[in-house]
Image: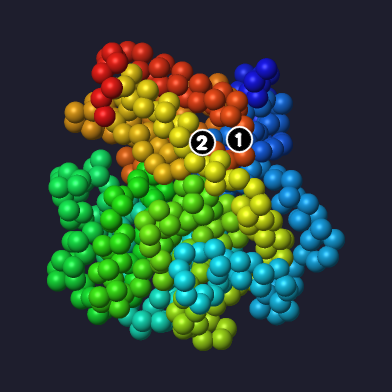
Amino acid sequence: MGTIQLKTPIPGPKSRALGARRESAVPRGLAHATPIYIARSQDAWLEDVDGNRFIDFAGGIGSLNSGHRNPHVIAELEAQLKNQLHTCASVTPYENYIRLAERMNQITPGHFPKKTLLVNTGAEAVENAVKIARAHTGRPAIIAFEDAFHGRTYMTMALTSKTHPYKAGFAPFPSDIYRIPYGYCYRCSYSLKYPTCDVYCARHLEDTFKRMVAAEEVAAVIAEPVLGEGGFVNPPPEFFRILMDICRRHDILFIADEVQSGFGRTGKMFASEHYGIEPDILVSAKSLGGGLPLAAVSGRSEIMDAPGVGALGGTFGGNPLSCAAANAVLDEFENGDLLKRANSIGQQFEKRARDWKARFELIGDARGLGAMRALELVKSPEIREPAPEETKKVSQYCYEHGLITITAGTYGNVIRLLVPLVITDDQFDEGLNVLESALAAVCQKRPVLAGTGTT
Ligand SMILES: Cc1ncc(COP(=O)(O)O)c(C=O)c1O
């Protein structure tokens, strides 16, 4: 018997009752991808309050690379619970914060002295990275990218690209943010083709200094090494090295936002490693906490020390429970095979996706690094018109058949894979079979490319 077990029509009666309570108690602005309410979770499966069991390809939006209720994380949390819950790191500090900072300084890319600040969320970490970059350089401007997502606070909304639902109606935003195209080859903003383009999108940063903002006004360039909400886009291999060379020439810092691409998702601890870059500041969150809220800002010591005493921090940043969980997550990466697993999951997905792409015209692009994989759906491969309605239908079909998926992309036409890396081969196959049936069902009335193997 497979992992997926649907015992009631979904959502079941208990989930429906909770949905009704939610409607009157919680603002609609908090979206929910599915109307089921979760009672239990383990590894890569979820069980709802009606006893239905699902395979989870969403992993709390990439927060559970080490699995739901990872046993080592739970053991370390239980041990921590017996000692202390909270004192505030800015009042009476504790050892596991320091240990985690030391370990983050070791594992983030870059052979230079580093320091790490712990906060609660990805957005808070990005806010702090910007504060620190401005304090260090004494410059105001930040350059961000088209299709970027950095969070929902004011600075991070300003850095985020997608208008609806993230930005529309919330202006005015903080100033001195400039936006340039990302290395999104499938939808190149310059209509060029890699590699003959010579990665013009990255080289064009020099032009930005002439036409938009003077280089000496720019504190930092911030980028996701693989776009998360923007559609799991991995730029060409040279993209970040070219950008960083330009940054270096102008004493501009490079901030890597690895909130979604970090902690093993791409088959390396951080996606920056795929590109051979050493960011001045690296922001991580999500899977760092193994299911608890935690985020980190790690960077060159002299940069991290720019803000004065008391300028950084917050009541709960780096609380002892989150630090215990994160240290356990790091143990799992050190002692287990999660990175290897991410790569084999990625290979399995790639193999299936290649076959699907040959069979289903709906798939315009199948891409990704390690286990950070995506399918971009289009109305036809020739004109590449995004297919958001079909994408929703694929995701809905999956949900109705016991597989939780989430979408992404500026055009809402990307199915992304954020499965916990502890999923078994059988479970992963079971999930992929549901996804394949979903694609087939949505493509039923569409032309089928009979084994053309189009790329
Ligand atoms: C790349 C990236 N940066 C920042 C954030 C914001 O993180 P949080 O939701 O923890 O504030 C996210 C969240 O999805 C993200 O993917």
Residue plotted at (28% across, 34% down): 386
x, y (%) of residue 34? Answer: 55, 33
Task: Quadrant for the N terminus, please.
Answer: top right
Q: Which residue is mark 1?
A: 423
**Position of 175 compared to 1: left or right?**
left
Residue plotted at (15% across, 66% down): 207
**Position of 378 compared to 88: left or right?**
left
Mark 1 Cβ inside 8 Å of ligand 1:
no
**Position of 398 compared to 317: left or right?**
left
**Callout 1: helix, strand or loop?**
loop
**Position of 190 compared to 250: left or right?**
left
For residue 391, which quarter of the picture? Answer: top left
- The CA span between labels 1 and 2 is 9 Å
> Disc 1, disc 2: CB below 8 Å?
yes
Tell me how many marks there are: 2
Of pointers 1 and 2, the one earlier in the residue sequence = 2
* Tag 2: amino acid: Ile
Residue plotted at (29% across, 50% down): 236
x, y (%) of residue 278? Answer: 41, 66
278 in relation to 115, above or below: above
309 in relation to 1, above or below: below
Task: Quadrant for the C terminus, please.
Answer: top left
Residue 345 is tagged as: 2
